[in-house]
Amino acid sequence: MIPIDLSGKVALVTGVGDNESFAWFIAKALNAAGAKIVLASHPRMVGIVETFLSRDMDKESRTLSTGGELKVEKVFAMDANFDTMADVDEKTRGDKRWNKYPIFAIKEVVEAVGQEFSGIDIVIHSMAFSRDILKPQIETSRSAYLEALGISAFSYTSLLRYARPFMVSRGGGSAVGLTYIGGSRVIPHYGGGMSTAKAALQLEAGHLAWSLGEDNIRVNLISAGPYLSRAMKAIKPGEAHKMVEYAASRSPLRRAITPEEVADTTAFLCSPLASGITGHTLYVDAGYNVMGG
């Protein structure tokens, strides 16, 4: 057996909003492998995440595959809509859900993590949003389209731009982002610029891999199959399960994926076992991507 040992590594996991998301399971897998976990969640979600991390009724969801319980060093508030605090608009500055945190833009949060934990080894990008996601492309507004691109795609560049010096100081590192087959195919109920954002993210990861390769920083993506997370169920109530069932029935493995499979693959990509892999989109979808429909 070849073990995955991430002992001593500092992992910044973004986008955790509850205890059912891919990001939550990724944090658990990295923690089980020995990594220190720092979370960056949207300002409106920090309190919810902290509840899941402490509430007795959620203890089972914190259990690691190796035994023991998920330990998170700290939860930061971070809004991927803003690269720096100087970019924050007056409306957001006046909102008590945001202004109760001294910092919540990408630059300041990443720098705070890097300084407090003496560097960063792993960056997980699990952030995506479109307010028009249920609208077809023809009805998508320009503002929603550009917002989706900024939050869902460019934020990966922004994260790594500011994490770069802290990863270099540790001799390099690994970044893994989450994408979806909607970035290369038309998926109903995945509009509002989200498909375009995922397509951009996929090409962006290749550019980032080239830019950061000289620093021994590897940049990859996982294209996960449909999974009934809280977020997915909220997108199209009553329809999400149909998307999962459709993909499962047409996948070579004839089943849906589990979040643990995505998390374990992420741990692999962040480990020395994947030292030669960068700029790659790895499908964890029970093989659905190879099918014609």
Image (cartoon, helix red, strand yellow):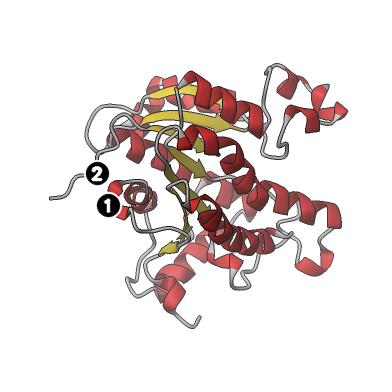
Q: Residues within 10 Å of mark 2 (few under 14, many from 20)?
A: some
Residue furthest to the left in view is: 1
Residue 100, quarter of the rendered image? top right
Judging by the rendered image, the residue that carries numbered circle 2 is 4
The Cα–Cα distance between marks 2 and 1, rounded to whole angstroms, is 8 Å
Q: Nearer the viewer, mark 2 or mark 1?
A: 1
Rendered view: 184 above or below 69? below
Element at badge 1? helix
**Foreground residue among 291 and 275:** 275
Q: Position of residue 131 (x, y in %)?
A: 75, 49
Q: Position of residue 6 (x, y in %)?
A: 30, 37
Residue type at mark 1? Answer: Leu
Residue that appears at 65% across and 63% down: 195
Residue furthest to the front in view is: 214
Confirm or deny contact between disc 2 and disc 1 (CB under 8 A): yes
Q: Is residue 20 visible?
A: no
Q: Position of residue 37 (x, y in %)?
A: 41, 29
Rendered view: 109 above or below 163? above
Judging by the rendered image, the residue that carries numbered circle 1 is 273
**Foreground residue among 5 and 284:** 5
